[in-house]
Amino acid sequence: MLLLPYLEQDNIYRLWDVRYPASKQTPAAYQQQVAMYHCPSRPDFVLSTGDFAPGGGGLTDYAAAFGTAANFTNSNGAIIPTNPPQSFDGSGNPIYTTWRGSLNLLSITDGTSNTLMYGEKHVRPNSLRGKNEDRSVFGGQNNSIRRMVGIAPNGDIRPLSPPNNQNGALANTTFGGPHSGVCQFLLCDGSVRGISLSTDIQTLTALVTRAGGEVVPNY
């Protein structure tokens, strides 16, 4: 939602009261299907099911690069979770008082041209469209908006997934697009690169961590 003004979507952004969560907004706000969030190589969007609102919400084909770990306390990527300051409105309902990120460009000490920010999220074929890890971009359901890659501190290994990966370990939390052999990523310097699905796990770990100090080889 906070990206909408930068995507020339002010008309949708103005439907939101940014103090409240998605479940408290009008359906006209969270049921929007934003064209910029859709990969044209995937099926058309539908409204999500089993989500934060009975009627469902708009989708996205892209996810934030949390880093190597699903655990919020070990988020070592360029996009990490944060809890904005909260207060209460005049009726006693909880509200967010401000939106401010936990990181800035200086936090990306590995270099913005070597650090992933967003990428195509792998969605298991049986989850397309609008359910499980393909639920709404506006609802905050973890696996619908974030992905991990590389080797996690607990030993979990997440390579890039091919489109047909239905039952592989951790398949619902990996990156991977519908394209043959590559997954598209936005890096922190604003460039877009297609990264081969065969890229080795050490290189992927170096690319997704923001301050690991690794030397990133050619990829």
Image: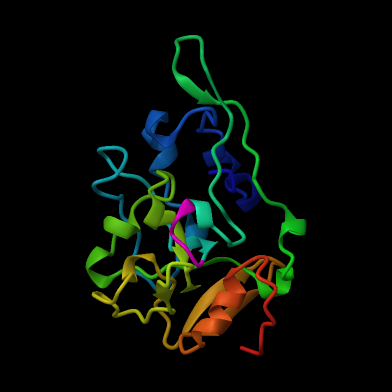
Against 186, residue 141 (above or below) is above
Against 135, residue 121 (above or below) is below
Which of these two is toward me, 24 or 151? Answer: 151
Residue found at the far top of this picture: 90
Q: Where residue 43 appears, x then y in whole percent?
A: 33, 68
* Identity of the residue drawn at 33% across and 71% down: 171
* Identity of the residue drawn at 62% across and 49% down: 8
Magenta-tinted stretch? 68-72
* Identity of the residue drawn at 38% across and 79% down: 161
Q: Is residue 59 visible?
A: no
Residue found at the far front of this picture: 154
The answer to if 39 sits in the magenta stretch is no
Answer with the quarter of the image where residue 186 lies.
Answer: bottom right
Report the side of 204 relative to 43 (left or right): right
Q: Where residue 210 appears, x then y in whole percent?
A: 65, 65
* Identity of the residue drawn at 43% across and 50% down: 137
Answer with the quarter of the image where residue 170 lies.
Answer: bottom left
Quarter of the image where the C terminus is located: bottom right
The answer to if 71 sits in the magenta stretch is yes
The color scheme shown is rainbow
Our reading of the magenta stretch's main secondary structure is: loop
Against 105, residue 88 (above or below) is above
Residue found at the far right of this picture: 106
Count of numbered tags: 0
Report the side of 6 relative to 185 (left or right): right
Q: Where residue 199 appears, x then y in whole percent?
A: 51, 87
Q: Where residue 100 appears, x then y in whole percent?
A: 65, 39
Q: Is residue 154 visible?
A: yes
